[in-house]
Image: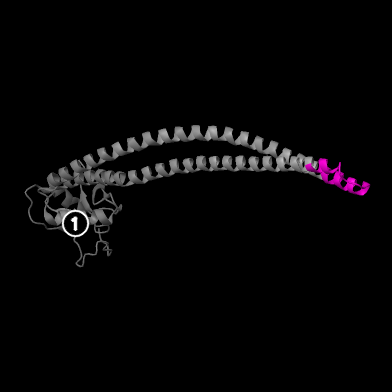
């Protein structure tokens, strides 16, 4: 496994077979424990990610409920605006009626035909303006009716969404508690698992795990190449692995190698 790469930043070249202080466990037992540790650490990392993701999901749920609530408030505001518009049109119509009545009384008092024609023209203009207002009132009433129907749907949608989101929030919070409990057990189990693993090997494992996307220990794939970088194994590497006396690493990717059962 010859390579000039040194991704771990080790100043001295790392040989294919590194001497370590004799562990209380055999080399094979340590390797199997590292493989198990790697699997357990992957599960723990998933639990940590899950625990971190749940509050974000819950926040998104709250945002969705708030968005629907804002839509409902906006609909009520539109209804209020339409009611005010209707009220103003109604007031303007009443004013036009009053002006028409006043001009009708004035017709009895004018002395000239010209003044009479002018008053008739003003009355006609007022009646047209009143007709326009009444048309607007009808249109406003129609819009109000549509708005109220829309609000019924919005209220129903909001209640359904709120109920569903509250149930989902409760489910996620329960999942978070379960994940935290599982992680606590995993952390406790990890302490038991690392006992007996030589400090040097454990330090190498931790460094590799952080640098190699969580994969520090790999099997010799198909019995002839590194399970991490696929570099073909030399006969010496194979012999060293079979002897099982020392810890063997890949000279290219620096991962710890082992022979699968």
Q: Residue furthest right?
A: 113
Residue span colored magenta: 102-124
Q: Residue furthest bottom?
A: 11
Quadrant into which the N terminus falls: bottom left
Q: Is residue 16 above or below residue 177?
A: below
Between 177 and 31, the one nearer to me in the picture: 177
Mark 1 neighbour density, 10 Å: few (under 14) some (14–19) many (20 or more): some
Q: Position of residue 222 (x, y in %)?
A: 27, 44
Secondary structure mostly seen in magenta is: helix
Q: 137 left or right of 59?
A: right
Q: Which residue is mark 1?
A: 204
Is residue 39 found inside the magenta-colored segment of the image? no
Q: Position of residue 155 (x, y in %)?
A: 50, 34
Is residue 117 found inside the magenta-colored segment of the image? yes
Q: Is residue 101 above or below residue 215?
A: above
Q: 249 left or right of 59?
A: left
Q: 215 left or right of 33?
A: right
At 61% from the left and 41% from the top, the residue drawn is 82
Q: Quadrant of residue 178?
A: top left
Q: Quadrant of residue 141?
A: top right
């Amino acid at each position: 496994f010859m390579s000039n790469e040194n991704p771990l930043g080790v100043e001295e070249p790392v040989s294919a077979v590194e001497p370590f202080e004799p562990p209380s466990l055999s080399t094979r037992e340590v390797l199997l424990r590292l493989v198990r540790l790697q699997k357990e650490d992957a599960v723990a990392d998933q639990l940590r990610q899950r625990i971190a993701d749940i509050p974000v999901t819950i926040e998104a749920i709250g945002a969705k409920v708030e968005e629907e609530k804002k839509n409902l408030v906006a609909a009520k505001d539109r209804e209020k605006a339409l009611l005010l518009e209707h009220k103003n049109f109604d007031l303007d119509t009443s004013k036009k009626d009053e002006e028409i009545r006043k001009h009708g009384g004035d017709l009895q008092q004018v002395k000239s035909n010209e003044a009479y024609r002018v008053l008739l023209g003003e009355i006609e203009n007022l009646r047209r303006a009143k007709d326009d207002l009444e048309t607007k009132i009808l249109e406003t009433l129609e819009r109000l009716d549509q708005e109220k129907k829309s609000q019924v749907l919005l209220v129903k949608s909001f209640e359904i969404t709120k109920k569903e989101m509250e149930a989902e929030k409760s489910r996620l919070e329960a999942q978070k508690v379960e994940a935290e409990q599982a992680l606590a057990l995993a952390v406790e189990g990890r302490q038991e698992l690392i006992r007996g693993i030589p400090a040097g090997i454990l330090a190498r494992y931790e460094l590799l795990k952080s640098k190699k996307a969580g994969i520090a220990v790999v099997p010799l794939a198909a019995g002839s190449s590194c399970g991490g970088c696929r570099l073909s194994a030399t006969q010496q590497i194979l012999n060293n692995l079979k002897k099982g006396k020392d810890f063997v690493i890949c000279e290219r990717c620096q991962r710890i190698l082992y022979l699968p059962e």
